[in-house]
Image: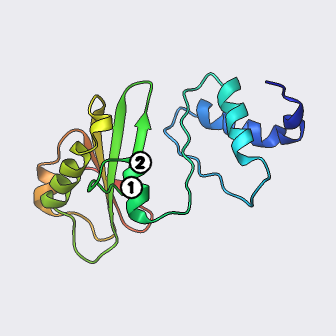
Amino acid sequence: MSSEPFKKRTRELADLASITTSGKAQMLVLYGRRRIGKTSLLRHWAATSKAPSFYWTGYRTTSEQLLESFSDRHAEIDLLAINWHDRNALFGECKWTTTKMNRADLESLQTRAAKLTKLKDFAPSYALFSKSGFTADLKKNLPENTRLFQGGAFEEMTP
């Protein structure tokens, strides 16, 4: 693949490279007006980078069609992060209400995640994000593969 079209994209390629060398799990959302080379930039970076990568393109469609195209029916997940190399999947649920999240919220997320049969061979972990916090029961009986984030800045809670 020729790098000629990417000579003026040095800064963007450096930004993408910094994501893979940070040592942290990260997600990139790339957006912009049509026909400026977003997809070409990502494809070029994925082809020249040694980092495992995955990209997904959104299209205008109904919510139902979008959910069916990306996952199994009736398994709506607020957040999904996949580590293809280590075969791990992080499933997240976000609640921006005045009610604390509880064990039922976690169990519901676990049930919906299990419906994603395309990820059945991945080790699951869970993240709950809550504006109002978590019940004492959930914090006391928190599974090892689950993390809690609370408040507007979503600071991680320790049980």
Residue found 89% across the figure and 41% down from its top:
8
Residue at the spot of label 2: 70
Residue found 54% across the figure and 27% down from its top:
52
Three-letter residue code for mark 1: Leu
Q: Secondary structure at mark 2?
A: helix
Three-letter residue code for mark 2: Phe
Q: Is residue 15 visible?
A: no
From mark 1 to mark 2, how far is it between C-alphas?
A: 5 Å
Q: Is residue 121 left or right of residue 67?
A: left
Relative vertical location of residue 38 with respect to residue 83 in this rendering, above or below: below
Q: Position of residue 44 (x, y in %)?
A: 73, 32
Q: Is residue 69 left or right of residue 93?
A: right
Q: Observer-nearest residue: 149 or 117?
A: 117
Residue found 28% across the figure and 46% down from its top:
126
Instruction: Work out which residue is located at the far bottom of the displayed protein and give it.
Output: 98
Q: Is residue 100 visible?
A: yes
Q: Is residue 32 left or right of residue 2?
A: left
Q: Position of residue 11 (x, y in %)?
A: 80, 42
Disc 1 + disc 2, Cβ < 8 Å: yes
Q: Observer-nearest residue: 41 or 134?
A: 41
Q: Residues within 10 Å of mark 2 (few under 14, many from 20)?
A: few
Instruction: Work out which residue is located at the far top of the displayed protein and give it.
Output: 50
Q: Secondary structure at mark 1?
A: helix
Q: In the picture, residue 53 is in which quadrant?
A: top right
Quadrant occupied by the N terminus: top right
Q: Position of residue 60 (x, y in %)?
A: 55, 63
Residue at the spot of label 1: 67
Question: What colour-coding does the image apply?
Answer: rainbow
